[in-house]
Every structure is written in structure tokens, then in C-alpha cells.
Image (spheres, grey):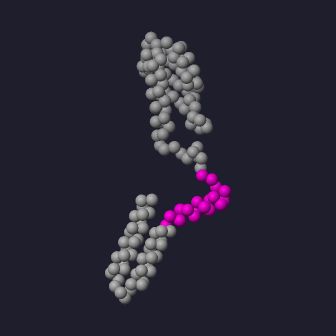
Amino acid sequence: MRDYFFALLIASAFGSLCAAFAGARFEKQMRFIAALCLLAAALLPLKNVIPALRGLAEGETAPSAREIPAPSGYYAGAEEAAEEHVRGLLREKFGINPRSVSINIDWERETPEVTRVRVVLPRGADAGAVKNFLQSELGGETEVVGE
């Protein structure tokens, strides 16, 4: 929108300069050229509207959120956040800090779903209790490995 108003400003400034420097002899022609420049700048947004209207007339619809690709690194960032969440759950529930956590999430479903969780625990941690807890909280395949 900012670019549009900038184009209108440039077109009107161009027309004013042309009219000022043309003198009385070419005043009508310069006004006509300035009016054409302003008209072109005013109608410029229609170049984007017309193809969209054609698409609607042919029955096209806007793509759903699933059809629009996610930005690069989006899924990896979400999985890292989920891994950090699992670390927090284990610290809160069991008072342990796992050596590593990895999570696989299936992004192709309607609602993303955790398919696999792998946790490496420090020595002395109860792997069975952690595994049961994670399965009840997250679902999916859960693998808990103790050192």
C-alpha cells in the first residue's frame, strides 16, 4: 500500500513539473500527459485484481493452509521446542535432566502428531516410570534408554 501511494506521489509530482516547465504553449498537452500518468498510477492495483477475478470465475479457490509450504526450518524449530518441553516435564515430574531427547512429529496429518520419542536418561533414573509417563502424556512410540 505504501508503494502505491508513493507511485501516486511520483506521478503527480512528475505531472506538476512537466506542466511548470512546458510553458503556456504546451500547457494543454502537459495537463493531458499528467492526467494520463495519474490515471495509470490509480489503475495500477487492478493488474492484480483481474487475474484473481478470472480464477474465481473458473472455480479456483484459495489454497488451504496445508497446501502452503511452511517456511524453511519451521518444523525443526517446532520439534526443538517440543524436545525442550519434554525436558521440562521430566525435570518437573522426576527431578531429572535427560542426556538427550529427540522427537519425531508427523506433520502430514490434519493435526500434527508425535510419532516417536527417544530419551536418554542419566544413571539411576527409573526408565520404566519415565517411559509410562511419556506414553501417557505424548502417545506414539516411546523409547527410554538409561546409561
x and y percentages locating residue 21 in the rendered image: 33, 81
Q: Which residues are magenta?
A: 44-62
Q: Residue at x 51, y 17 (%)?
A: 130
Against 1, residue 34 (above or below) is: below
Q: Residue at x 47, y 27 (%)?
A: 85
x and y percentages locating residue 82 in the rendered image: 49, 30
x and y percentages locating residue 58 in the rendered image: 66, 59
The answer to whether 84 appears left or right of 24 in the picture is: right
Q: Outermost residue, top direction?
A: 124
Q: Residue at x 64, y 55 (%)?
A: 60
Residue 123 at least partly seen: yes
Where does the C terminus fall, quadrant-wise? top left
Against 56, residue 11 (above or below) is: below
Against 50, residue 84 (above or below) is: above
Against 87, residue 6 (above or below) is: below
The answer to whether 64 appears left or right of 122 in the picture is: right
Total label count?
0
Residue 142 at least partly seen: no
106 and 37: which one is in front?
A: 37
104 and 83: which one is in front?
A: 83
The answer to whether 5 appears left or right of 104 in the picture is: left
Q: Residue at x 35, y 87 (%)?
A: 24
Magenta span: chief secondary structure:
helix
